[in-house]
Image: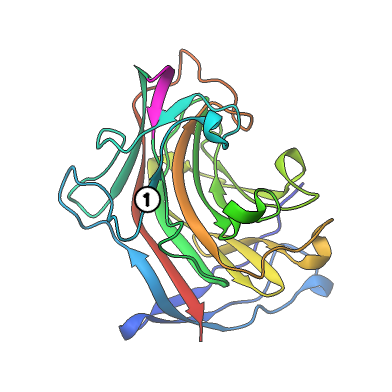
Amino acid sequence: MRAIYFNKKSFRLLAGGLAIVTASFFQGCSRDAMQTLPARTWELTWSDEFDGVAGSSPDATKWSFDIGTGSNGWGNSELQYYTDRPSNVSQDGNGNLVITARSESFAGSGFTSARIKTQGLFDQAYGRFEARIKTPTGPGIWPAFWMLGANFNTVSWPQCGEIDIMEQRGQQPSITHGSIHGPGYSGGNAITKSYALTNGRFDTGFHIYAVEWGTDFIDFYVDDFLYQRITPESVPGEWVYNQPFFIILNVAVGGNFVGFPTTGTPFPQSMIVDYVKVYRQR
């Protein structure tokens, strides 16, 4: 499917966490299809800029860990064991969080990595969720910035809903994917679209990945370009996005989405997160 793109927006953060967002006209299609995005005003509600000392764990008041493998009840045939060790997840002392996948034998797995989440600590319905990230690369490497419905433990997946703000296949370093999963459209039947850089790779620099989410839409952005809008009318099942969601950051090794790493996959591989910020609309 060919993605349709929007012009870059004017996005300005004001004092006190208030942001004014003015969207420009739609481009990339006929004049008959042109539309104007609504102006949105955002107020910062939650953030982490990872300003801890080098080697420290992420703020325990904001993040917890998933520990183990897919045998814990989650996973997609992934190969890594998720740990809370600083060698897999820590702040670097320069304002970044670093999640590192390693090729090593650990607890019966051939690889280690980390997966952190705000479950039970922070969740929100609607708003702008964004992160500035430099992603890893290589066949079989699967970085992700995503969300699950806060009712995950009671209704399970996919009924809880899933919003994948950013997923990448390490073997395709110029392409990122935005998706949603819900009842009747999960796994290989997710609603998804990709965004490709025409010149450049996502692993060579930082990019801003975001969704803007309301009662009847989810908009997906890369560097403030809107490349996908999903509405209840475009979903072949129940719309389960009118509830709070929590945030997840992880780097998987292997799995259904990316396949196996190869002898050409470099290790260790790190996803570097400059910040995560959440806003609500004023």
Q: Residue furthest bottom?
A: 282
Residue 196 place in picture, x, y as percent: 59, 46
Does 110 sit above or below residue 84? above
Q: Is residue 274 left or right of residue 21?
A: left
Give the image quarter of residue 31: bottom right
Residue range highlighted in magenta: 107-113
Answer left or right for 205 relative to 228: left
Instruction: Inspect this view and state whether residue 213 appears.
Output: yes
Residue 256, position as x, y percentages in the image: 64, 29
Q: Amino acid at mark 1?
A: Ser
Residue 109: horizontal and vertical position, in percent? 43, 19
- Which quadrant of the view contains residue 5? bottom right
Residue at screen point 40% across, 50% down: 133
Q: Nearer the viewer, residue 96 or 196?
A: 96
Name the side, left or right, on which 62 lies relative to 195. left
Outermost residue to the front: 154
Residue projecting furthest to the top: 263
Look at the picture and state if 16 lies above or below 31: below
Decide whether residue 187 is among the magenta residues: no
The answer to whether one can see residue 210 in this image is no
Q: Main secondary structure of the magenta part?
A: strand
Residue drawn where x is 61% and y is 70% of the image: 213
Q: Residue at x 52, y 44 (%)?
A: 199
Front-lying residue, 139 or 277:
277
- Residue for badge 1: 64
Above/below status of 229 relative to 85: below
Q: Nearer the viewer, residue 273 or 112?
A: 112
